[in-house]
Amino acid sequence: MNIITVATTPFPGQKPGTSGLRKKVKVFSQPGYLENFVQSIFDNLNGQQGKTLVLGGDGRYFNDVAIQIILRMAAATGFGRVLVGQNGILSTPAASAVIRKRGAFGGIILSASHNPGGPDDDFGIKYNLGNGGPANETFTDAVYARTREISAYRIVEPADIDLACLGETHIGAMRVSVIDPVADYAELLESLFDFERIAGLLARPGFRMRFDAMHAVNGPYAHAILEGCLGAPSGTVVNGTPLPDFGGGHPDPNPVYAAELVTALADPASGLSFGAASDGDGDRNMIVGRSFIVSPSDSLAVIAANYKLIPAYAEGLAGVARSMPTSCALDRVAAELGIPCYETPTGWKYFGNLLDAGKATLCGEESAGTGSNHLREKDGLWAVLYWLNILACRDEPVDRIVREHWRHFGRNVYARHDYEGIEAAKAEILFAELRQKLPTLAGMEFVAGRVKAADDFCYTDPVDGSRSDKQGVRVLLEDGSRVVFRLSGTGTEGATLRVYLERYVADPALHEIPVQEALAPLVALAEKVARIAEITGRKVPDVIS
Ligand code: VG1
Ligand code: CO
């Protein structure tokens, strides 16, 4: 095996965001671009020689090309073995499962998650550690630093490994094992839930579900688990073949991009009682009842409140965690259970320490990510099975379960407004102004109420003491309502402003007020404080979820 050292020069902007490095395919396919980033990851590893790397992705355009390059670079850096998903496929949660089960040194996941794919769209890459979770900020900062000074990468000559057939090959001394992408993951999920009971639910004549895989990675997983292991009728999974461009769609399971599913659940003629979807890399989920979309923050709270129904969690939750912008519905459940509720910055990497240390059992984000200590990633199908397990035990429709939850805990009315593709310079001005105003906001009166405090969220990890600052501007009102402003760290074009709005409504008589109506005073406050329309020229958000 000949290791070739190729001279290179740094590319600007190889800074990992909320979840890895995401760029347009056109950027990633420049000669040396992917190689520089991968070498910068490898240069920050210690002791990988002879160890196992897990490799796979969501099947998007450029996945196949990138995998062949990474295999050759893994051989050059001395990995002893690479476990690669058949056809290059591994969902993010499945990659986490494989890393953990096989005791791998780490993993590389190729995905830009919910971002569109195709020659003109996005590609992404992230590194996961031996615990199966995304590398922490210290690591990603070090990778970024390396990308700015890199002068050479190492690769072996072309090998063209056939990824279509399961089995073993070699690149020089390195073993390449093409594995079933579903098996380890399916086995893990089966160990957590009551599969017999769920199968019983799926066989009930009055129950019909649809799972929309959105032409993304979860198709094969959903076919195997829902229609295979659990016996759901074939046709339950729709859009179940991963396509390099996700069929031209936007693989983000929210009311806008999964509108087809929402419409089907609103049509009595469809006979559907439960709908679900997941994103590009299979780690997000959407839960839909008959004419009822479960907001992700509510879903997380319902999941926590019903832990006793699920075999893996029935003995109790050590604690729960949510990202800061996620609604406080979870906190109310934790308070009643008498367990801690941790508040972390956005991004799953911040849950890793809490999960490893046994401080949190369940975690979630408002962006439709939910998961537990079974993995170190959020897990779309896990959330769907969790809901199916609840439904199988409670025998009530989705909307009634959520409405009863509100009656018991009160309702945290919630919405996220996204303004996509804003000019980066304008977003900078908006945040500079906002941060400058922060010290003056406390005590100010708005129609929505009086400001109790305003700050820029800063997190100190309770396990390793590391600090992350500037994680989102918060305006907290005296009645517990809040508005949070953040810039997305996953986009590839301009800036995306996210405005998170939350208001707590205790009185059940007010629970059915339309969300936008209940939140209107907070929307007005957001506009007043951040001058969104004036600075960006945008009067309404592009996506409301
Ligand atoms: C978004 C979400 C965040 C999530 C991240 C990765 O980040 O808000 O909650 O962890 O995407 O999700 P941002 O920085 O754009 O707000 V993904 O589906 O990689 O699975
Ligand atoms: Co995702």
Image (cartoon, rainbow, N blue to C red):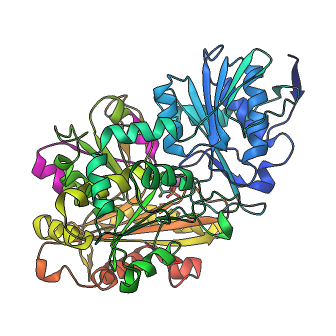
Question: Viewer-proximal residue, 259 or 335?
Answer: 259
- The residue lying at 37 percent from left, 59 percent from top is 325
Q: Could you tell me residue 148's position as x and y percent?
A: 74, 36
Residues rendered magenta in the picture: 332-352
The answer to whether residue 297 shows anywhere in this view is yes
Magenta region includes residue 347: yes
Quadrant assignment, res 122: bottom right
- The residue lying at 24 percent from left, 71 percent from top is 397
Quadrant position of the N terminus in the picture: top right
Q: Could you tell me residue 9's position as x and y percent?
A: 85, 36
Q: Could you tell me residue 250's position as x and y percent?
A: 60, 67
Q: Could you tell me residue 16's position as x and y percent?
A: 61, 44
Question: Viewer-proximal residue, 103 or 511?
Answer: 103
Quadrant position of the C terminus in the picture: bottom left
Image: 82 above or below 113 = above
**Left or right, residue 93 beside residue 383:** right
Magenta region includes residue 385: no
- The residue lying at 67 percent from left, 17 percent from top is 80
Image: 62 above or below 173 = below
Image: 278 above or below 94 = below
Question: Viewer-proximal residue, 540 or 251?
Answer: 251
Image: 486 above or below 109 = below
